[in-house]
Image: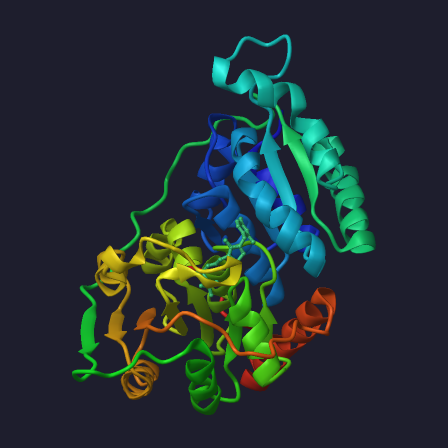
Amino acid sequence: MIEARDFFAEAARAGFDFYTGVPCSFLTPLINGALSTPGLAYVGAASEGEAVAIAAGAWLAGRQTVVMCQNSGLGNAVNPLTSLNEPFRIPTLLITTWRGEPGIPDEPQHALMGRITQDLLTVIGVPHAPFPASRDSLAPAFAEATERMRGTGLPFAFVMRKGDVAEEELRAADRPLPAPGRRADFPAGAGAERPTRVAVLERFLQLVPPDGAVIATTGKCGRELFTLADRPQHLYQVGSMGGASGMALGVALNTRAPVFVLDGDGAALMKLGTFATIGAYGPRNLVHILLDNGVHDSTGGQPTVSASVDFAAVALACGYAQAASCATLDGFEAAFREATGRPGPTLIHLRIAPGSMAKLGRPTVRPPEVAQRFKAFLAGVAGAAGRDAPAAA
Ligand SMILES: Cc1ncc(C[n+]2csc(CCOP(=O)(O)OP(=O)(O)O)c2C)c(N)n1
């Protein structure tokens, strides 16, 4: 058995400086320790998949990351681990618990996952080792993990058993509540047609500042953005639907650059919990642009339920500093100009028309290259600021 502080000290020596995750009772000592250690950056995520996306963003902004979860939550994390970390070659140190370990009495809901935890990690290409549960094993375990991650550019997992870390008291201060946000509506005039996504992206490209980092959601949004303009500060999130906003949060908490995420209504609804995490952690440099065509346009136009959702109200209820709702290109531009003059996090919700540009390409630059040049862009912004990027609160 080790103390949480032993783990954090070895992790810090190995360069790990950003933590996120969702609790498990086996993880309580480590998460309590993370929450109680002054200066240690820990983001409590709404879901394990969101945590993986947040960590990916933090890595792009120069951090080395740790994601902590219960093995039940591995199921929630499989999608981004396989369709975000893998294609983009984004490493993270995953600590998953081993509820349902065969031979040890546990609750019925853990039995199956307990039998397959290591096999599941292997199947999804995540090498793993037992969590280092003695002081002597810490340094070699970190050496193995970091060497494997450096070699592959991919995640590595420690599998934690009950009692691996000694009990730790929770001494975390409550997070300050965000002040009530501000809403702005830019209604369309009678008979105004909704803009297309490509028209909005064209306008966006005229408005976005040169030091702005841009993350585009899964599907045709990223493809259209790439077709209009391919820039080093663009990240086209080809998989991990719903993960763009989490990734943007991870970036925004660790950079001084303004961060823009182009989201879809289907994707936003898939990971609505991320709104609450963004609102609570409150990065002032994050602008969340929701291109709401009311459908899953990229897969053939099947309706989402977005028509009955007031996303600006959702964002404000979750703690965003500002939220705007609009339905025309000029409304979008007005909302954008207002938003970028004030501290966020900001949501700009724009109702658009379904459909896509006729000749739609796919990014020809490969995901690992997209990630590397995006990372280099953010490092350049941090270098230009002459200081380290801020650590997450
Ligand atoms: C987890 C997951 N489920 C489903 C898909 C298939 N898929 C790709 S894009 C997409 C639609 C996304 O809809 P929305 O976010 O509204 O964006 P739009 O296509 O309308 O631009 C779907 C369902 C996927 N890539 N990942």
Side of 113 where 292 appears, left or right: left
Side of 252 where 349 appears, left or right: left
Residue at left offset 57%, top offset 28%: 165
Q: Position of residue 294 (x, y in %)?
A: 35, 62
Where 311 falls versus 206 (above or below)?
above
Residue at left offset 65%, top offset 46%: 93
**Scheme of colours in the image:** rainbow
Is residue 208 something that shows in the picture?
Answer: yes
Q: Quadrant of the C terminus?
A: bottom left
Where 89 falls versus 35 (above or below)?
below
The image quadrant of residue 58 is bottom right
Q: Position of residue 338 (x, y in %)?
A: 28, 85
Residue at left offset 72%, top offset 28%: 119
Q: Is residue 346 or residue 391 the one in the foreground?
A: 346
Q: Is residue 379 or residue 325 the one in the foreground?
A: 325
Where 198 falls versus 60 (above or below)?
below
- How many tags in the picture? 0
Side of 205 where 185 appears, left or right: left
Q: Position of residue 44 (x, y in %)?
A: 43, 47
Q: Is residue 341 or residue 313 the one in the foreground?
A: 313
Q: Is residue 141 or residue 284 the one in the foreground?
A: 284
Q: Quadrant of the N terminus?
A: top right
The image quadrant of residue 329 is bottom left
Is residue 131 something that shows in the picture?
Answer: no
Q: Position of residue 189 (x, y in %)?
A: 18, 84
Side of 109 where 282 appears, left or right: left
